[in-house]
Image (cartoon, rainbow, N blue to C red):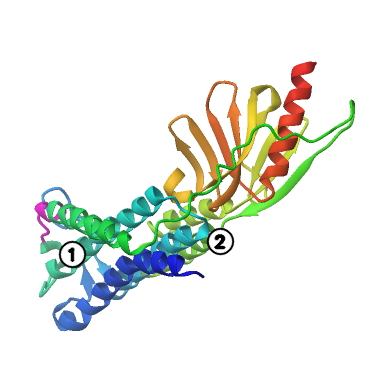
Amino acid sequence: MNQARVRLATVTAAPFVLALGVQLAVPLVVGDRLPDSLATHFDLSGDADRDPMSRTAALVSGVLLFLGVGALWVASALGSPLTARGVRRLTAGGWALNGFLGYALTATLFANLDATDSSTVHLPLWQLGVAAAVALAAAGAGLLLTRLVPDPKPEPPGDDATARIDLADGELAGWSRRTGSGPLLAAALVTLVAGVFVAVAVSPLYGPVVFLIGLSALVLASAHVSVDRHGLTVRMGALSWPRVRVPLDGIDTASSRRINAVADFGGWGYRIRHKRTGVVLRSGEAIVVRRTNGREFAVTVGDSVTAAALLNTLVDRRKRI
């Protein structure tokens, strides 16, 4: 790993490490004043409105939150080359997220100090305003720290939609490859485990909900991508469902492009953005299809250059019919 990548990983991981440190330090300092059950959810008036959570479950949940999201953030930063704007967005977003969550969770712990009845715990709504202010300040600090990261070298555009594969008249050809997301798979497994933990230690009502979220993430963690006479097809998960297909008659051109999951699409999975959608399972090269309606569809997969060239060839053949 070169120096730029080391610095980027450090700046990206720093807010998660700091927030995690605070979450571990507060119980050590004031642990004797925290009750066994903590109020963790409040209504708009600031009063606790749900069953309390055990102190152990609350602290473990906080640790898993910062470890899981932090791992995803760092993996995204190191997953592919970033533009200077991508570095700024990724860093500022990570610092802002940790500023907000770190303050909110810490304020919740302090609200529970010396409480003998969790139903009497009060967390004023203005605390959310303070959390938002902390998030903005943290985002500013993150932007300042991006100055320590050398500007990435500009990536070649990699958007040549003129590539073709020579096929004789009547000759058939196809292309397929599996792709997946390590961070999304890890997040899915952590969420599945968390669902079981929540069901056993916290609430049998919320546990299955968390488990289903993890199961959904597991389905979206891998895909089979194919190009043939039907067009571009993406089948998700081991069951090949759900399925996304872009038919040849709906394609204008196809190209290979490098994208970053967070900077370009805001995360992993099936993503929807203005005039573009995508199955984004990792950062890196992707097939990018420009539809005849002007919208784009992208799927991150290896050997995207070959897939895009074959798509262009098949689209040209269909237009001649």
Say which label, 1 or 2, has the lower sequence index.
1
- Label 1 Cα crowd, 10 Å radius (few <14 / some 14-19 / many 20+): many
The amino acid sitting under disc 2 is: Gly
Secondary element at tag 2 = helix
Residue that appears at 42% across and 60% down? 73
Please tell me whether residue 30 is drawn above or below residue 71 in the rendered image.
below
- Farthest residue in the top direction? 321
The mark lying in front, picked from 1 and 2, is 2
Of residues 121 and 155, the one nearer the viewer is 155
Residue that appears at 59% across and 42% down? 158
**Residue at which label 2 appears:** 182
The circle drawn on residue 299 is: none
Cα separation, mark 1 vs mark 2, equals 33 Å
**Is 31 in the magenta?**
no
> In the rendered structure, which segment of residues is drawn in magenta?
122-128
Q: Would residue 199 be visible to someone looking at this image?
A: no
